[in-house]
Amino acid sequence: MTPTIWLLIYVVLASLVIFLSIKLSKYVDLLDKKTKIAGALLGGILLAGVTSLPELFTSLTGTIIVGKNDLVLGNIMGSDFFDIVIFGVVYFLFFKKLTEGKVGKQHYMSCLFTALMLIAVTIAAFVFNANGWLIGYFNPMSLVIIAIYVVSLILTPKTEEKEENEEVDNSLTVKQIWIRFAIASVILIAASIFVTIVTDKVVTGFDIGETFGGSLFLGVATSLPEVTATIALCKKKNFDAAYGDIIGSCTFNVIILALADAMSFRAATPLFTITSDSFMLLIGTAFVLLLLFLSILYIRSKFFKNDAKSRIILYSISTLLIASYFVYLILASMKITII
């Protein structure tokens, strides 16, 4: 088939991912209202885990079947970068709802653990990989990444008191919600596996760099669940679950790197081999994560109100978030050599 046909197939699969993600966000919001499970737990672990399944299966497929670690690293770092930038759009669209909603302090800790995992990735690349301190192709820092993630799970709040005046759709029981959630998740996994294979055909057919192609096509496509789920949750003012989904997805994505590292025996290069593209992604992700942390800090402060000053500050952060991603795309398309 021609590259154009593969591109059309990619669009169809991406559309399916969007549809399923909207359904999943609806089920998570219902579970949040019908149970005492904390919104941060539902968003940060349950929804984040499911919406990150595309990254998991596309990365493992890219490593085990396609054997291209550049594609995997670009996919994961591109997804994290893109996921955080989503809030640049959210702040523009839902400013008023943010002033009326609730944002828990647990997201500070989530940002911290994400930052620690990015630092571990940097050490894995520039210390262990650069000096050849590997066990075969396996990077020992992958174990550190897993340990950080486990600690973050232990410290995540498990339950919370719910507001009694919340409107709840009573047409579905909790059991029915769980069943539908599981079915949508399975279909999402299947679509994700095919997205990887199709992306490789598109990248090869149009002669696009593997890391750049991974961050653009795989990174965006596998981030569609987070985008649609987050926007749907913000419409319902469920910002705890929305932040939990995005930040939780970022940490889960880095865990995927560790898992892919263990499976990368068929790849031509070790997984934590940093190129100019992946280096820019790493720097960009760290920068937008800092902006996200500062925005949460401000939104939770007593200074955040539904007024012009707060709007200007949050819109400024939004602009920086979105601009950062476009700056990366421009630099990557120019194929600038940094390292």
Image (cartoon, helix red, strand yellow):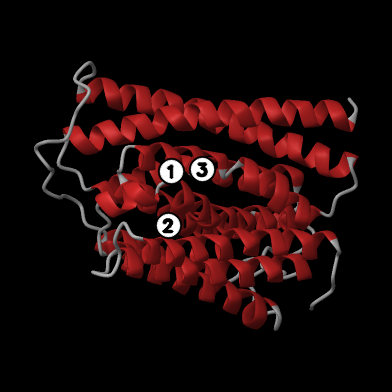
In the shown orientation, is residue 53 left or right of residue 63?
Answer: left
In the shown orientation, is residue 201 left or right of residue 80?
Answer: right
Labels 1 & 3 near each other (Cβ < 8 A): yes
Which residue appears farthest toward the top when viewing the image?
Answer: 171
For mark 1, what is the residue? 230
Q: Quadrant of residue 272?
A: bottom right
> In whole angstroms, how far apart are the C-alphas of marks 2 and 3?
12 Å
Chain-order first, disc 1 or disc 2: 1
Q: Vertically, is 68 above or below 269?
A: above
Q: Quadrant of the N terminus?
A: top right
Residue at image position (63%, 79%) is 128
**Which amino acid type is marked by label 3?**
Val
Q: Vertically, is 283 above or below 204?
A: below
Which residue appears farthest toward the front when viewing the image?
Answer: 308
Label 2: which secondary element: helix
> Dot 1: within a 10 Å radius of its alpha carbon, few (fewer than 14), some, or many (20 or more) residues?
many
**Which amino acid type is marked by label 2?**
Ile
For mark 2, what is the residue? 247
Label 1: which secondary element: helix
Whether residue 137 appears in this view of the structure is no
Depth order, front residue of 238/337 = 238
Residue 279 drawn at (x, y percent): 70, 71
In the shown orientation, is residue 45 left or right of residue 264?
Answer: left
> In whole angstroms, how far apart are the C-alphas of marks 1 and 2?
11 Å
Residue 213 drawn at (x, y percent): 77, 50
Depth order, front residue of 325/53 = 325
For mark 3, what is the residue? 227
Q: Quadrant of residue 322?
A: bottom right
Labels 2 & 3 near each other (Cβ < 8 A): no
Residue at image position (64%, 45%) is 220
Depth order, front residue of 248/67 = 248
